[in-house]
Image (spheres, rainbow, N blue to C red):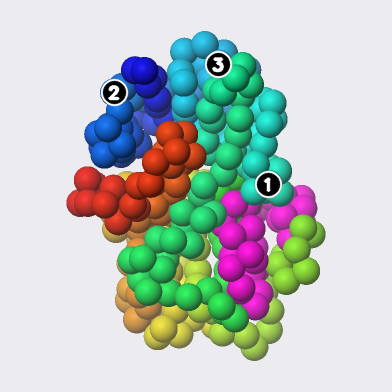
Amino acid sequence: MNWRVGVVGSPIAHSLSPQLQIAGLKLAGLEGSSTRVELGLERADELKVLATRKFDALSVTSPLKMVAWAICDELSEVATRTKSVNSLLQRDGKLLGESTDGLGFVNSLSGEMGFSLENTHAVVLGAGGAASSIVDALVHHGVASAVVHARNEAKVAELAGRYRNVFSRSLVYRPVDLVVNALPLRARGEEAAVLQGVHHETVAVDLAYEPRMSLWRQLYIDAGCRTMNGLPMLAYQAALQMQWWWGVGLEGAKLLEVLQ
């Protein structure tokens, strides 16, 4: 089989997913091609046609993860909980949906930073598809608490309401062990200050990877924190995604080498 894979979202020109997918095909011993598709919310109704007629498997990025969730015939447990899909696959005439963002993020924290989530206090900036998946993974990997900050109060309240230890407002007198910025660059305001509660062992992760060093990430470096951009999560979630597509084992660390 010659696999037709790709990545869809907007903006998409900067996406490194094709490099990862070509590398994954090679490592898996498969033939295929990878294509970027620019598709915004104004044309979201085209996603199902793309996924079912023009591709065998698709990686879905912002702003279409919740759209992808809505068009699937079958969803994984994680995708069902998070209402977010970043991976689409055709199988037996059905469109299947999976979310590998959350576990990919957790694996990248462990693999690249040696960071354990057990009993930590986290803050997530954003309430979109990626943030939803990450909050779910944080809860299922042992955080003591997670706080979600975003401009859309309704989305924040809906996300926080799914879990007993996720909150829509900051918790007084608690240190912040992990900060995750899941906001698209275009949705960010002026970077002014680090969060209260940050300390010298705090890990700050910016899911953006273009530029590699964002203004937000630099603020946390200046505050003495360990930081990481979004490249490790991209590689680790892609490894899980392609493992789901093809049923072969791939290592996130190995795919990360392709991007560095």
Callout 3, which amino acid?
Thr
Q: Is residue 15 left or right of residue 49?
A: left
Q: Earlier in the sequence, mark 1 or mark 3?
A: 3
Q: Which residue is mark 1?
A: 77
Q: State how far apart marks 2 and 1 are (Cα).
A: 30 Å
Residue 237 vertical placement versus 194 (above, below):
above
Q: Which residue is mark 3?
A: 52
Residue 179: image x %, image y %? Answer: 50, 69
In the depicted view, which residue is nearer to us: 222 or 257? 257
Q: Earlier in the sequence, mark 2 or mark 3?
A: 2
- The reply to whether residue 38 is visible in this rendering is no
Q: Earlier in the sequence, mark 2 or mark 1?
A: 2
The magenta segment: 132-160
The residue at 60%/34% (across/down) is 97
The residue at 22%/45% (across/down) is 258
SS category of the residue bearing label 2: strand
